[in-house]
Structures are given as structure tokens and as C-alpha cells.
Image (spheres, rainbow, N blue to C red):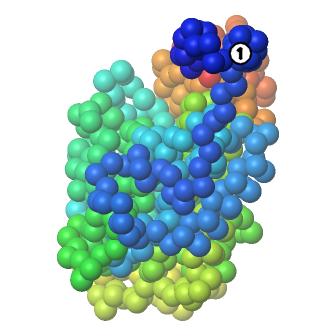
């Protein structure tokens, strides 16, 4: 711009009608670039391409769009110190697939990426893909909300070697119901379920049917981590995938233009399974152990909701729905800078809450009609077996749940218990004998481990790499290793500090390569493992 201006002014010098002093003054004047500002209602629409003519009518609700823009600006301003600077929101009319509002960024005029469209940028979705894994488990493996899943240390073989995933809180809960596993967003049960389904391919194929366009690699490249969100997705597409659950398993493509006539949906999964997942995602009591009441997930009406956070805090999500609307929220930074320990519930959650409340300001929220093919059951949450309805709520482990008649659990018998404790099968033997087991008062093994069992390290696996984020709350730099001889094995390391070497050691992690040694003092047997610790 400066060069072009000077060329024009120099040419004017040859014209005697222009005063030389004025030309010299103009040449000396600095050039100031001002960002283009717009008052266009939805400036990001032009970036989508393939739009009809100038007089096109869109499906956007302008007052709603303006209100959500205000919500995004206000909520991101509150989290500026936590380095959450950008956010995007999508609101869909479930009946038609019409986009009612799309906020692409906190401010279109923000010089730091304000004109990026956060709704169409591929980002790591965290745990928001887990509901689709459980839908597959219900469809193909006939799981129900009360099915028992194993939350125990489980090494999985990957292309890079053995992987030993952990839950967000590094705890292992043993047997849990599917309802608890999904509501509390546990990692191990989700990965084990995907493994039982044959690996990542079925989940990738389902996501592609639901309109996810960003899964460009072979399923094996993602591995079982696909259910934890290791593949990038677009907020717009993922929100529409959730709208498919809200429609009872029928898919409609999203659209920015009004639908004329009745759209023809495509059935992707059974309406009963869609209802069961919606029932779990709206169950505040089931998620309370991980997401205590009183937060942004508690709305003044029933609402299915799921959060997600990428492992390095680059992205957080909150997506949910009622029968009428589906809302998806992404929060983070367009420059891919990590946030300071902000999870989906703390970052995207408040935006989701306010947006969903705004959507229902003029339309009272309802809930889905219960499908005719479901019955009420009462189960023992420790083993998933059928118990008398009169046991609820007197017995602490009794819970009422739903299932199709053909998937009714088997009744519990006296052989399933010992001294009031539910008996576990051998799958849980190592976990039960480890310090990770905090449920000794309610569970028991059918038989004891042999006294002479040799020492083995259960977790961490040899060669495990730990990533430390300086912004994660205090306590995340601690590791609690587990052996099959809790209270017996003694731990040591030449490079790491270990508190209370027995019975429950606490290892303070720091960057580097370290050797941990477990010793059985009765026999002198040792077991050494090497771990690596890195910082983000």
C-alpha cells in the first residue's frame, strides 16, 4: 500500500496543477492500516462457499444469533486469564437439521484469529465420542445400562508398543455399570468396549455415517484411542451427530437454509438404544461422582449432555440436546496454545448452559417419550444381576434401571455373594489384591491368591511415558504404582522421590528417564520397570 501510494504521488509531480509542498507532505505522511470491521449479521457465512444468490434466506434466527454471540463474548472474557480466548457454538433444530445459530468465534473483529471459524476447524474432541462407542456396544453386543464393565488396569498393544491408559483421576474402580462408565466418562471401560467390538474400525465407520468428514487415516492409526478423541473432528459435524441421537437414531444433514416439506431421515441405530444413551447422558445422579451437582451441567430442565477435554488442554467441549434442540460448544485457542487446566465443564460448560436456556426461553423444554419396548428392572450395581424390586432403595447397591425384555439380566442367587459381598470372577483378581481397590467392604474374590505368588508390577507398564502439564492442578505429578502384592512389595528409585514405600507408595514425577524397583522383602525378588516423564 505504501509503495503504490508513493508511485501515484511521484507521477503527480509532473502535473503543474498540484502544489509541490502538498505532494511532499503527502509523501511524508505515515500509512496506517486499519482492520476491516463489519456489522454483517453472520460474516462467516461467506466463507462457506456455494451460497445461492444475493437474496438468499437462511435458517439463522438473528435474535438468537445475537444473544449467543453476547454469551460467548461474556464467558470467554471470564476465562481470559486461564488462556481460553476463543469459542464457537452451533445450535440445531432437531426436527429439520436447520442451523439456528452458529457463532464462529468470540469476536469476528478480533485480530488474533477472530475470522477463523471455530465450528469448522478440526479439533481434538476428547471424551465426546464415547457415547457412540456405547451405542455400538448396545447395537452389536446387546449391552444395557446395567451391564457390568471392567475398570481395571488393562494394557493394549498398539503400533508403538504397549499402552496402559488411565482414567482422568488415575483411579481404577473395578466392576462398574455401563451407566456409570458413560456418565462419569471413564476411559478404561470405553476402550475395553471398543476392543470387544473388534477395534476402532466399527466406530470410525459409524462416525462417517454420521457425517464426520475428518477421519482421513486408517482406523489402526487411531487405535482404541479413537473413543477417547485422538482424531480431529469439526464442531459443526459432531453437533449434528449428537442431533442424530436426539432424533432417536435417525440422521439428517445439517443445513443453513429453511427446509420446505418434510425431510427424509436415515435410520442409523435403534430408537431404544438412542433413548437409553439419552437417559444416561441426562442422569445427574449417575455422573455426580465425577461431576458434582451445582455446576453448568445442571439445567432447569432435563437435558442430555457430554463434555470433553483434550489431553493437553488445547480443546474443551460441551455438547448436548433436548428433544427440540442440539447445542455444541468448543473452547480453546485458534493458535493451539494450551489453556490453564480448563476442562470442558469449566470452559465450554457455562456457554452451553446459557445457550440451552436461551433456546428454551420461548419453548418449554420437554423430554423424550419412553419407547414401548422397555421395562423397569432392579439390579445390584456390583454384578449387574437382577434383584427383587423391594431391595430398592433399602440396599445401598440396588438401583432401578431400564432394558428391553429380551436383554433382561439373570437373577442374582446366594452363590453370587459371600458374607454380603458380591463375588468377583478371576478377571478382577490382580485389581482386587492391589492398593487400587478401594471397595473391600462390598466385593470379594471367590478364592484367594496362592501365598507364593511371584511379585509382578501391574501398573505402570514397562516403557510407559507420562506427560506433565504445568497447568494441571496440584497432585497430577504423583504416580501410585501397583503390584499384585499390596502391603508387601517395597518400592525404590535412584532418581525419584518415593513417599511411604509400602503399602501405598506415592512417586513424585519429574522429567527424565527413571527406573522403579519393586522388591518382595520375603524372598528378595525384584521387578524393575523403566518410565519416561516429559513436560508439555
* Viewer-closest of 334 and 266: 334
Label 1: element kind = loop
Instruction: For residue 251, say whether it is visible.
Output: yes
Q: Position of residue 282 (x, y in %)?
A: 53, 73
Instruction: For residue 188, say whether it is visible.
Output: no
- Left or right: 197, with 67 as reference point: left
Disc 1 marks which residue? Answer: 19
- Left or right: 248, with 120 as reference point: left
Q: Position of residue 5 (x, y in %)?
A: 58, 18
* Viewer-closest of 153 and 357: 357
From this view, report whether residue 508 is shown above or below residue 262.
above
Residue depicted at 39% across the width and 25% down the height:
162
Residue depicted at 20% across the width and 70% down the height:
266
**How many numbered markers are drawn?**
1
Residue depicted at 49% across the width and 45% down the height:
117
Q: Position of residue 477 (x, y in %)?
A: 71, 28
Badge 1, how many Cα within 10 Å: few under 14, some, many 20+?
few
Amino acid at each position: 500500500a505504501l509503495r503504490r501510494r508513493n508511485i501515484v504521488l511521484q507521477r503527480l509531480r509532473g502535473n503543474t496543477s498540484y502544489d509541490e509542498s502538498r505532494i511532499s507532505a503527502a509523501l511524508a505522511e505515515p500509512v496506517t492500516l486499519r482492520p476491516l470491521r463489519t456489522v454483517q449479521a453472520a460474516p462467516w457465512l461467506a466463507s462457506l462457499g456455494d451460497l445461492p444468490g444475493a437474496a438468499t434466506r437462511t435458517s439463522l434466527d438473528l435474535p438468537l444469533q445475537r444473544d449467543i454471540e453476547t454469551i460467548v463474548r461474556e464467558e470467554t472474557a471470564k476465562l481470559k486469564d486461564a488462556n481460553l480466548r476463543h469459542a464457537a457454538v452451533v445450535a440445531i433444530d432437531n426436527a429439520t437439521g436447520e442451523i439456528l445459530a452458529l457463532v464462529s468465534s468470540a469476536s469476528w473483529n478480533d485480530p488474533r484469529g477472530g475470522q477463523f471459524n471455530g465450528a469448522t476447524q478440526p479439533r481434538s474432541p476428547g471424551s465426546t465420542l464415547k457415547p457412540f462407542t456405547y451405542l455400538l456396544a448396545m447395537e452389536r453386543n446387546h449391552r444395557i445400562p446395567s451391564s457390568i464393565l471392567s475398570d481395571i488396569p488393562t494394557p493394549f498393544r498398539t503400533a508403538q508398543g504397549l499402552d496402559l491408559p488411565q482414567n482422568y483421576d488415575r483411579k481404577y474402580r473395578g466392576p462398574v455399570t455401563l451407566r456409570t462408565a458413560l456418565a462419569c466418562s471413564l476411559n478404561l471401560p470405553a476402550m475395553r468396549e471398543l476392543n470387544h467390538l473388534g477395534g476402532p474400525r466399527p466406530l470410525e465407520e459409524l462416525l462417517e455415517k454420521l457425517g464426520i468428514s475428518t477421519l482421513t487415516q486408517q482406523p489402526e492409526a487411531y487405535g482404541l484411542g479413537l473413543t477417547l478423541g485422538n482424531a480431529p473432528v469439526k464442531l459443526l459435524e459432531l453437533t449434528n451427530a449428537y442431533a442424530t441421537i436426539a432424533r432417536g437414531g435417525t440422521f439428517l444433514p445439517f443445513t443453513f437454509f429453511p427446509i420446505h416439506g418434510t425431510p427424509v431421515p436415515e435410520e442409523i441405530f435403534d430408537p431404544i438404544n438412542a433413548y437409553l444413551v439419552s437417559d444416561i447422558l441426562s442422569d445427574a445422579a449417575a455422573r455426580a461422582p465425577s461431576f458434582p451437582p451445582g455446576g453448568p451441567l445442571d439445567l432447569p430442565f432435563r437435558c442430555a449432555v457430554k463434555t470433553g477435554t483434550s489431553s493437553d488442554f488445547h480443546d474443551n467441549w460441551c455438547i448436548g440436546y433436548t428433544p427440540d434442540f442440539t447445542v455444541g460448544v468448543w473452547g480453546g485457542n485458534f493458535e493451539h496454545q494450551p489453556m490453564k487446566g480448563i476442562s470442558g465443564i469449566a470452559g465450554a460448560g457455562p456457554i452451553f448452559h446459557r445457550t440451552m436456556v436461551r433456546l428454551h426461553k420461548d419453548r418449554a423444554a420437554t423430554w423424550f417419550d419412553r419407547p414401548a419396548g422397555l421395562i423397569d428392572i432392579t439390579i445390584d450395581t456390583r454384578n449387574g444381576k437382577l434383584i427383587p424390586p423391594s431391595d430398592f432403595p433399602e440396599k445401598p447397591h440396588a438401583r432401578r434401571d431400564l432394558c428391553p425384555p429380551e436383554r433382561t439380566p439373570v437373577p442374582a442367587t446366594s452363590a453370587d455373594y459371600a458374607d454380603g459381598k458380591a463375588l468377583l470372577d478371576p478377571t478382577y483378581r490382580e485389581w482386587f489384591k492391589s492398593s487400587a481397590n478401594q471397595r473391600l467392604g462390598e466385593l470379594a474374590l471367590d478364592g484367594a491368591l496362592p501365598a507364593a505368588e511371584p511379585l509382578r508390577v501391574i501398573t505402570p507398564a514397562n516403557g510407559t511415558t507420562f506427560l506433565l502439564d504445568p497447568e494441571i492442578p496440584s497432585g497430577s505429578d504423583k504416580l501410585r504404582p501397583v503390584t499384585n502384592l499390596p502391603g508387601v512389595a517395597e518400592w525404590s528409585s535412584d532418581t525419584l522421590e518415593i513417599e511411604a514405600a509400602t503399602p501405598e507408595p506415592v512417586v513424585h514425577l519429574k522429567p527424565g528417564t527413571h527406573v522403579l524397583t519393586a522388591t518382595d522383602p520375603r524372598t528378595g525378588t525384584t521387578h524393575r520397570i523403566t518410565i519416561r516423564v516429559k513436560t508439555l
